[in-house]
């Protein structure tokens, strides 16, 4: 059975790969930041019995963290792949 691999070895590292990497990193880090916000709010809820949750602020914060860290992670992964491609 052959596995489906979107990054074939003969394709190389190009702009399409960079955009895909950055997009996936942004989405993953955004989700992790949202889960972190939710868990932090739940821990505060169990301690104080008051739920302070503002969807707008938490989504904006998670988006800001996701974009800033996702772009850097995407470029870092691309640089690593480019170095491995030259090797």
Image: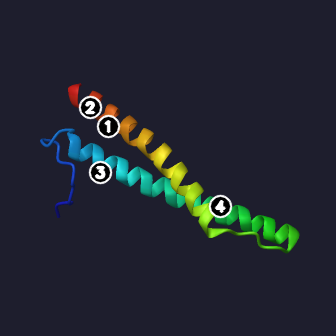
For numbered disc 2, what is the local secondary structure? helix
Q: Residues within 10 Å of mark 1 (few under 14, many from 20)?
A: many
Camera-side mark, 4 or 1: 4
The quarter of the displayed image where residue 74 is located: top left
Residue for badge 2: 82
Camera-side mark, 2 or 4: 4
Q: Give the image location of residue 35, x and y in percent.
A: 59, 63
Q: CA distance from mark 1 to mark 3?
A: 10 Å
Q: Which of the labelled discs sits on residue 37, or is there none?
A: 4
2 and 1 marks in contact (CB < 8 Å): yes
Q: Residue at x 71, y 61 (%)?
A: 40
3 and 4 marks in contact (CB < 8 Å): no
Q: CA distance from mark 3 to mark 2?
A: 15 Å
Q: Quadrant of the N terminus?
A: bottom left
Q: CA distance from mark 2 to mark 1?
A: 6 Å
3 and 2 marks in contact (CB < 8 Å): no
Q: CA distance from mark 4 to mark 1?
A: 29 Å
Q: Residue at x 21, y 55 (%)?
A: 5
The quarter of the displayed image where residue 55 is located: bottom right
39 left or right of 26 in image: right
Camera-side mark, 3 or 2: 3
Residue for badge 3: 20
- Which sits earlier in the primary sequence, circle 1 or circle 3? 3
Residue for badge 1: 78
């Amino acid at each position: 059975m052959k596995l489906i691999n979107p990054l074939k070895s003969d394709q190389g590292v190009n702009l399409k790969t960079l955009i895909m990497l950055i997009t996936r990193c942004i989405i993953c880090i955004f989700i992790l930041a949202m889960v972190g916000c939710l868990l932090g709010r739940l821990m505060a809820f169990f301690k104080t019995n008051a739920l302070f949750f503002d969807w707008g602020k938490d989504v904006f914060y998670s988006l800001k963290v996701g974009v800033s860290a996702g772009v850097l992670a995407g470029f870092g992964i691309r640089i690593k792949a480019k170095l491995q491609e030259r090797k």
